[in-house]
Image (cartoon, rainbow, N blue to C red):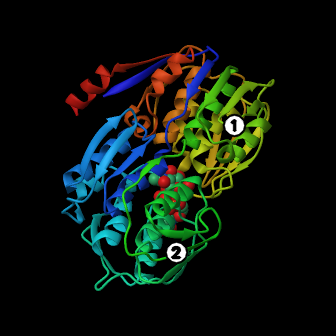
């Protein structure tokens, strides 16, 4: 196990490149098994969630080759298995995308219920509702999800009860080759939903309306192999925007899609960020003191839940009191205790957090409670007096490529070291 050691107080300066979107990659890589030829996927982020997915695909019989920096050749023609067992699925949440992809490919799928960050209850009833509407029989037994379409999937109307990114993408995957027309209503509109629709259309699917409330899909018989580049990661970009503003730095953030960042940028401007968006980059500085504001997280185009921990660091250092209302997850604020260790005044009641700004954090040992909370701990450490140690680095590795290297290149005093104390505790336990 490693930990991060941060000596705070240095504003970030310079340029940083944003990688491919994690939440698009974890859907697009499984989707390649639906093609009848090899696919080359570019701008694949070098993060542990992607490594796990590629290991699962390799063990299923997909020919996986790294053909360049951030580029993979994936040939699923030799795929044999339609079963993903517990040990594999438990390692990441997005293993559920194999359900939709394998249903499309084989007409049946068996995947263990997924793992992932502990943000609250993570049911997949809406995914199964869509599969059943398309004519599948779905059974959950001993932690495995079994889906079987019998004599093939048939297009249908699906009205989701709640807006779910995963269920929207999974339904799109399953419906591409379903016979006839599928209409998905009350769907998620996140940029990664559109990215998945784009690659599927390039493969030969007929999907319209991705990015709106209704997606219409006319089933096709064949999908071909393609070359495709994944969109930039809006949350990684948002994280660096928050870090630049929090430390009072001056950072150029390159390889972004400004449209995907509109909500994040407008809200961080209200908190005191001075942000100029260009065609593919953002110039970020602090305008003056950080300012309190209220936030409510909502599905896209609302403020993304995956940006609340990073934004809450800004609010915890702002003048005044802010309220964050979490609209997606029941357990998003588990990191509040950790930020309190650093001096933040942060109280949580259910899905609401009340933050009273303080003028400074003081460095302390803290633990990442999930991926985005880990990023928030690091940003807090960069702003704190003295030394902060962040444990639970494996969460950060799930979704941030070379986070430490990118921050060091911006002048941060941060290093990753082996956590000998943790090893001793483990040996004693
Ligand atoms: C995705 C993102 C995650 C982000 C979340 C919300 C990936 C791999 N992860 O997660 O980082 O925080 O979107 O933007 O893309 N729900 C149900 N039944 C279902 C499915 C979801 O009740 O069948 C509920 C969930 O408990 C949650 C809400 O719907 O309260 C939204 O979940 P969803 O959009 O599905 O999140 P994920 O796709 O798992």
Mark 1 CB near ligand 1 (8 Å cut): no
Q: Earlier in the sequence, mark 2 or mark 1?
A: 2
For residue 136, which quarter of the picture? bottom left
Residue 271 placed where, x, y %? 76, 35
19 to 245, vertically: above or below:
below
For residue 78, which quarter of the picture? bottom left
Q: Residue 141 has which mark? A: none
194 to 160, vertically: above or below:
above
Secondary structure of the residue carrying numbered label 1: loop
The residue under label 2 is: 217
Residue 9 placed where, x, y %? 62, 14
Residue 228 placed where, x, y %? 45, 49
The residue under label 1 is: 279
Q: Residue at x 73, y 24 (%)?
A: 285
The number of callouts visible is 2
Crowding at dot 2, Cα within 10 Å, few <14 / some 14-19 / many 20+, comes out as: many
126 to 247, vertically: above or below:
below
In the shown orientation, is residue 293 left or right of residue 103?
A: right
Viewer-closest of 172 and 186:
172
Residue 163 placed where, x, y %? 58, 67
Q: Can residue 120 be seen in the rendering of this structure?
A: no
Mark 2 CB near ligand 1 (8 Å cut): no
In the shown orientation, is residue 117 left or right of residue 140?
A: right
Viewer-closest of 193 and 324:
193
């Amino acid at each position: 196990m490693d930990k991060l050691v941060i000596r705070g107080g240095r504003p970030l300066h310079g340029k940083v490149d944003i990688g491919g979107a994690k939440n698009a990659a974890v859907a697009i890589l499984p989707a390649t098994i639906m093609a009848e030829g090899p696919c080359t996927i570019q701008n694949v982020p070098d993060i542990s969630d992607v490594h796990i997915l590629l290991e699962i695909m390799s063990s299923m019989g997909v020919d996986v080759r790294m053909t360049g920096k951030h580029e993979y050749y994936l040939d699923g023609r030799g795929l044999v298995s339609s079963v993903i067992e517990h040990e594999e699925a438990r390692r990441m949440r997005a293993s559920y995308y194999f359900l939709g992809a394998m249903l499309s490919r084989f007409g049946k799928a068996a995947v263990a219920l997924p793992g992932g960050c502990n943000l609250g209850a993570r049911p997949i009833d809406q995914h199964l509702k869509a599969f059943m509407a398309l004519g599948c029989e779905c059974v959950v037994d001993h932690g495995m999800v079994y889906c079987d379409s019998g004599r093939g999937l048939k297009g249908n109307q699906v009205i989701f009860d709640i807006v779910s990114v995963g269920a929207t993408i999974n339904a799109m995957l399953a419906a591409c080759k379903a016979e006839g027309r599928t209409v998905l209503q009350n769907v998620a509109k996140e940029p990664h939903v559109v990215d998945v629709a784009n690659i599927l259309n390039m493969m030969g699917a007929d999907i319209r309306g991705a990015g709106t409330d209704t997606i219409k899909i006319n089933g096709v018989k064949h999908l071909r192999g393609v070359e495709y580049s994944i969109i930039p990661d809006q949350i990684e970009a948002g994280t660096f925007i928050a870090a630049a503003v929090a430390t009072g730095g001056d950072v150029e953030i390159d390889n972004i899609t400004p449209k995907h960042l509109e909500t994040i940028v407008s809200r961080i401007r209200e908190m005191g960020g001075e942000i100029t968006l260009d065609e593919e980059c953002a110039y970020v500085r602090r305008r003056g003191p950080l300012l309190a504001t209220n936030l409510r997280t909502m599905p896209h185009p609302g403020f993304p839940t995956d940006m609340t921990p990073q934004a809450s660091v800004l609010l915890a250092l702002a003048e005044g009191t802010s309220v964050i209302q979490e609209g997606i997850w029941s357990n998003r604020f588990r990191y509040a205790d950790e930020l309190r260790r650093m001096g933040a005044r942060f109280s949580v009641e259910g899905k609401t957090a009340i933050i009273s700004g303080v003028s400074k954090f003081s460095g302390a040992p803290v633990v990442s409670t999930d991926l985005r909370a880990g990023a928030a701990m690091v940003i807090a450490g960069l702003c704190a007096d003295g030394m902060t140690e962040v444990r639970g680095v494996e969460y950060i590795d799930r979704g941030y490529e070379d986070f430490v290297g990118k921050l060091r290149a911006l002048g941060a005093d941060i290093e990753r070291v082996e956590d000998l104390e943790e090893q001793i505790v483990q040996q004693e336990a």
